[in-house]
């Protein structure tokens, strides 16, 4: 052993660990003692540090600040930047129902949408048309939506009928034109429906009975126009229309090579028959065997040249349509959101619900709970008053203390059971 070093010499001038901590040697031998400060621990629990609920007002302020930044960005020179801001504002209006905030900035938003529709191209025009629908969904049915429709609908119609515009812009404008006409209290629904029919009539059978060849991007435009036309059909008196597609023309669309067009045509046929049966229009009630045979084939389609997912979607949709056409059996769908349920018990109600699904996407449930416009259209009644969450909902500190008490009670109970266990000796 090297000199100068003695075995067993401890640090601290020979003082024991108990003396260093200010305790006796007897106390230092107790392994159950904790060296953590009880004062700091007690302060942590009493003050509730780490268990504070998020400040909703602060979150709301941050949300509105970011939304204002996006609205300010709608006037920038960069087309890509304007498109990004249009999409950002649209996403914000989807996430929250803020009618007062939107109403205070209605003129600003309307002017920006109008400018983007006039000067923009392609994706920017599509984003502006989408934002126009969300603006009216926030404003609700009334004079404000009527004003927006009068200012924007001529531009939407112009873009829709202009073949030099991009297909994505024309598709969005056709859908926006249909939805804004649906929400606004205007008397030109007949004119709008005629405009939309002039678009999807490109998928009608030709004069010689042959099926037209339609490119996929044009088929998406025809689908959007036909879907918007069907939405307006849910609020229209058939006797007031100057022109109306016949069942034979809509039946020809069932032969389209594009799934979306076929399904929209089947939905249009169901809506047309539903409206006719309500007013007993005999000339529309007669369904020929050719139409029934087409619906049966589409409801049992098993052609391998079509994608498996497309076949499944088509069969599911056309089974419901066939049941209605043959047996007058309406759809029976229940949609649950929160503590409420929405019954989609007619094709008109289902079409209106699907339209708002397309516009609001993931924000639909929130708007179903809070948006007066949607609740009125879908006949959900008055909004359910939210409970006082501060009084009912436990704070994180209360949940933490309750879990700790439950854990202690479980530990004591298990300890008692362990004491009662008998030892088993194996010979």
Image (cartoon, rainbow, N blue to C red):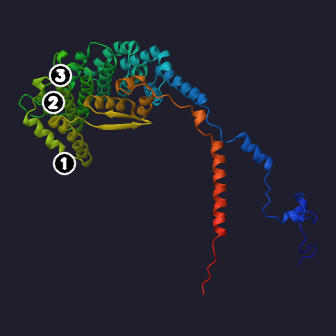
What residue did someone put label 3 on?
Answer: 279
Which corner quadrant holds the N terminus?
bottom right
- Whole-percent x, y for residue 191 in the image: 23, 15
- Whole-percent x, y for residue 91 in the image: 45, 30
Splitting the image into 4 quarters, where does residue 313 fall? top left
What residue did someone put label 2 on?
Answer: 250
Q: Secondary structure at mark 2?
A: helix
Depth check, mark 3 against mark 1: the one in front is: 3
Q: Secondary structure at mark 3?
A: helix
Q: Is residue 197 left or right of residue 339?
A: left
Q: How many tags in the picture?
A: 3
Mark 1 surroundings within 10 Å by alpha-carbon count, few (fewer than 14), some (14 through 19), many (20 or more): few
Residue 121 appears in the rendering: no
Splitting the image into 4 quarters, where does residue 205 fall? top left
**12 or 247: nearer the viewer:** 247
**360 or 199: nearer the viewer:** 360
Q: N-terminal of the two: label 3 or label 2?
A: 2
Which label sits on residue 37? none
- Whole-percent x, y for residue 58 in the image: 61, 29
Q: Is residue 371 left or right of residue 35?
A: left
């Amino acid at each position: 052993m090297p000199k100068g070093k003695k075995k067993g010499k401890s640090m601290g001038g020979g003082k024991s660990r108990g003396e260093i901590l200010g305790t006796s040697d007897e106390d230092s031998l107790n392994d159950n003692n904790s060296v953590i400060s009880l004062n700091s621990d007690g302060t942590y629990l009493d003050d509730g540090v780490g268990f504070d609920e998020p400040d909703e007002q602060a979150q709301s302020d941050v949300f509105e600040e970011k939304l204002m930044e996006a609205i300010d960005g709608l006037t920038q020179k960069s087309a890509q930047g304007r498109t990004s801001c249009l999409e950002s504002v649209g996403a914000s209006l989807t996430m929250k129902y803020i009618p007062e905030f939107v109403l205070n900035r209605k003129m600003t938003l309307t002017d920006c949408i109008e400018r983007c529709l006039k000067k923009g191209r392609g994706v920017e025009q599509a984003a502006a048309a989408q934002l126009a629908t969300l603006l009216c969904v926030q404003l609700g049915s009334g004079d404000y939506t009527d004003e927006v429709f009068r200012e924007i609908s001529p531009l939407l119609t112009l873009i829709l009928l202009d073949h030099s515009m991009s297909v994505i812009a024309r598709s969005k404008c056709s859908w926006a034109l249909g939805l804004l006409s649906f929400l606004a209290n205007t008397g030109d629904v007949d004119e709008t429906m005629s405009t939309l029919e002039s678009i999807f009539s490109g998928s009608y059978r030709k004069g010689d009975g042959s099926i037209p060849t339609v490119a996929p991007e044009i088929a998406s435009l025809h689908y959007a126009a036909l879907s918007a036309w069907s939405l307006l059909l849910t609020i229209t008196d058939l006797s007031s229309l100057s022109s109306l597609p016949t069942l034979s023309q809509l039946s020809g669309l069932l032969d389209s090579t594009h799934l979306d067009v076929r399904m929209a045509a089947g939905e249009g046929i169901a809506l047309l028959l539903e409206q006719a049966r309500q007013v007993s229009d005999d000339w529309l009630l007669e369904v020929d065997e050719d139409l029934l045979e087409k619906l049966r084939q589409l409801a049992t389609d098993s052609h391998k040249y079509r994608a498996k997912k497309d076949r499944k979607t088509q069969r599911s949709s056309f089974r419901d349509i066939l049941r209605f056409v043959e047996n007058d059996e309406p759809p029976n769908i229940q949609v649950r959101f929160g503590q409420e349920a929405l019954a989609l018990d007619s094709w008109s109600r289902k079409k209106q619900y699907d339209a708002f699904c397309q516009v609001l996407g993931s924000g639909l449930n929130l708007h179903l709970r809070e948006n007066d416009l949607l609740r009125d259209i879908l006949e959900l009644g008055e909004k359910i008053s939210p409970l006082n969450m501060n009084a009912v909902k436990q704070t994180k500190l209360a949940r933490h203390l309750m879990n700790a008490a439950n854990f202690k009670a479980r530990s004591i109970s298990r300890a008692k059971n362990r004491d009662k266990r008998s030892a088993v000796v194996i010979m």
